[in-house]
Image (spheres, rainbow, N blue to C red):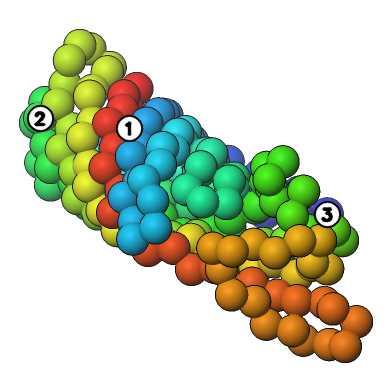
C-alpha cells in the first residue's frame, strides 16, 4: 500500500510540474559512439529515455559496448544544458552497471566461466544543434570507464593476458578495467 501511495504521489508531483509554464517534457537521446582506449578501438550504441525540465535532463539509458568484452551497460544519465537557445553546450554524467555479454571466443577459452556485473560510468561535454522542431543533433566527447570481473576454469592458454590462480582446483580470475575516450554522435527528440 505504501508503495502505491508513493507512486501516486510521484505521478501527482510530476503532473503538477508539467502544468507550470516550464513544462516537464519527454526526452529521448539515441547515440552511436566510438571508444578509444589503450588496448583497442571499438563502437557502442545507446538509448536514453527520460524527462527534461528547463535546462536539466534525467533519464535511464541502456546500450551495447563492444570494447574488448562485449557488455550491456544500464545507467542513469544526468545532463545540464547551459542555454535555452536552439544550439547549446551541455555536460553529462552517466553511472550504472555493466552486464557482460560474452562472445564465442570467451566461451571457447573458458569453461565454467562467470561474470560479475560491475560499475560503468561516463562523463563529458557536448553540443546540441537544433535541426528541426523537436529534434536536435548531438556531438559529445568524454571519459568512459568499464570494469569486468571473470572467474573461470581454464580450457586453453590465452596468450594476450596473465592470470592468477586462486585455488588448487584451477579456478582463476581476471579483473579487467577499461578507461577510454568516448566520442558520440546522435539525435535527441
Residue that appears at 28% across and 17% down? 134
Q: Quadrant of residue 37?
A: bottom left
Disc 1 to disc 3, C-alpha distance: 30 Å
Q: Position of residue 3 (x, y in %)?
A: 75, 55
Q: Nearer the viewer, mark 3 or mark 2?
A: 2
- Position of the C terminus by quadrant: top left
- Position of the N terminus by quadrant: bottom right
Q: Quadrant of residue 166?
A: bottom right
Which residue, given by chain and number where applicable, does mark 3 sit on?
1
Residue that appears at 65% across and 52% down? 100
Residue 181 appears anywhere in the view:
yes
Q: Is residue 175 left or right of residue 30?
A: right
Front-most of residues 70 and 52 = 70
Label 2 SS = strand
- Name which of mark 2 and mark 1 comes first in the sequence: 1
- The circle on residue 89 is none
Which residue, given by chain and number where applicable, does mark 2 sit on?
87
Label 1 SS = loop
Q: Position of residue 112 (x, y in %)?
A: 87, 61
Crowd class of label 2 (few under 14; some 14 to 19; many from 20; radius 10 Å): some
Disc 2 to disc 1, C-alpha distance: 19 Å
Which residue, given by chain and number where applicable, does mark 1 sit on?
23
Residue that appears at 50% across and 43% down? 65
On screen, residue 189 above or below 17: above
Q: Nearer the viewer, mark 2 or mark 1?
A: 2
Q: Quadrant of residue 23?
A: top left
Amino acid at each position: 500500500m505504501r508503495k502505491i501511495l508513493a507512486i501516486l504521489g510521484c505521478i501527482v508531483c510530476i503532473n503538477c510540474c508539467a502544468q507550470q509554464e516550464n513544462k516537464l517534457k519527454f526526452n529521448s537521446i539515441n547515440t552511436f559512439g566510438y571508444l578509444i582506449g589503450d588496448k583497442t578501438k571499438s563502437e557502442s550504441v545507446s538509448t536514453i529515455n527520460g524527462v527534461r525540465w528547463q535546462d536539466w535532463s534525467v533519464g535511464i539509458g541502456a546500450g551495447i559496448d563492444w570494447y574488448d568484452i562485449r557488455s550491456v551497460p544500464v545507467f542513469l544519465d544526468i545532463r545540464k544544458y547551459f542555454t535555452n537557445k536552439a544550439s547549446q553546450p551541455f555536460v553529462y554524467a552517466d553511472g550504472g552497471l555493466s552486464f557482460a555479454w560474452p562472445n564465442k571466443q570467451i566461451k571457447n577459452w573458458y569453461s565454467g566461466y562467470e561474470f560479475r556485473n560491475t560499475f560503468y560510468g561516463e562523463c563529458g561535454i557536448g553540443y546540441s544543434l537544433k535541426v528541426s522542431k523537436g529534434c536536435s543533433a548531438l556531438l559529445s566527447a568524454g571519459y568512459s570507464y568499464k570494469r569486468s570481473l571473470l572467474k573461470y576454469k581454464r580450457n586453453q592458454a590465452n596468450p594476450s593476458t596473465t592470470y592468477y590462480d586462486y585455488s588448487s582446483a584451477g579456478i582463476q580470475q581476471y579483473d579487467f578495467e577499461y578507461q577510454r575516450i568516448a566520442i558520440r554522435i546522435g539525435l535527441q527528440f
